[in-house]
Amino acid sequence: MNLQLLLASLLGVCFTTMVCAAGPKTRSTGFDAAGQFTVEAETPAGVRQAVLEISDDLSAGAVWRPMIAKDIDGRAARVLFRLPPQSGPKLFARVK
């Protein structure tokens, strides 16, 4: 096999792994003036979707449920998720 082709393939796999490992980073959370819970996150280049997930448990085996998904075009972006006012148990939120 051509050594240059092998090296190019290996670099492609490494780059893809780095992009997949670098997920959205939450920048702020809180309630706005209308009482909506907001979560703002930055996504690195290469990410095609940001998903707001919720859970009522923070243990290692917790189940996170997707609530809102936003498709993005692969450029680095800042996404803002807004949830309507909730009445009920407390939930945890994350962007993935």
Image (cartoon, grey):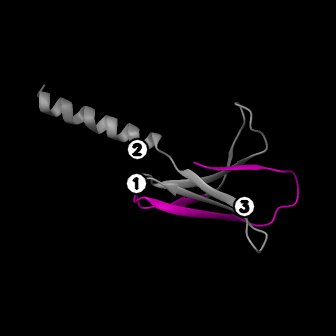
Residue 16 or residue 39, whichever sits in front: 39
Could you tell whether 56 is left or right of 28 in the image?
A: right
Q: Is residue 54 magenta?
A: no
The label shown at residue 45 is 1
Going by the numbered disc 1, the residue's amino acid type is Ala
Asked if the residues shown at circle 3 and circle 1 are in contact, with their CB atoms under 8 angstroms apart, the answer is no
Residue stretch rendered in magenta on the structure: 69-96
> Mark 1 or mark 2: which comes first in sequence?
2
The residue sitting at 49% across, 54% down in the picture is 43
**Residue highlighted by disc 2:** 19
Q: Residue furthest bottom?
A: 34
Q: Residues within 10 Å of mark 2 (few under 14, many from 20)?
A: some
Marked residue nearer the N-terminal end (3 or 1): 3
Residue 30: which numbered mark, if any?
3
Describe the element under mark 3 as helix, strand or loop: strand
Residue drawn 36% across the image and 41% down it: 16
**32 shown above or below 4:** below
Query: Which percent across, then down, holds residue 67?
Result: 67, 55
Mark positioned earlier in the residue sequence (2 or 3): 2
* Image location (x, y in percent) of residue 81: 63, 63
Secondary structure under tag 2 reads helix
Residue 8 shown left or right of residue 80 in the figure: left
Circles 1 and 2 in contact, beta carbons < 8 Å:
yes
List the single residue furthest toward the top: 1
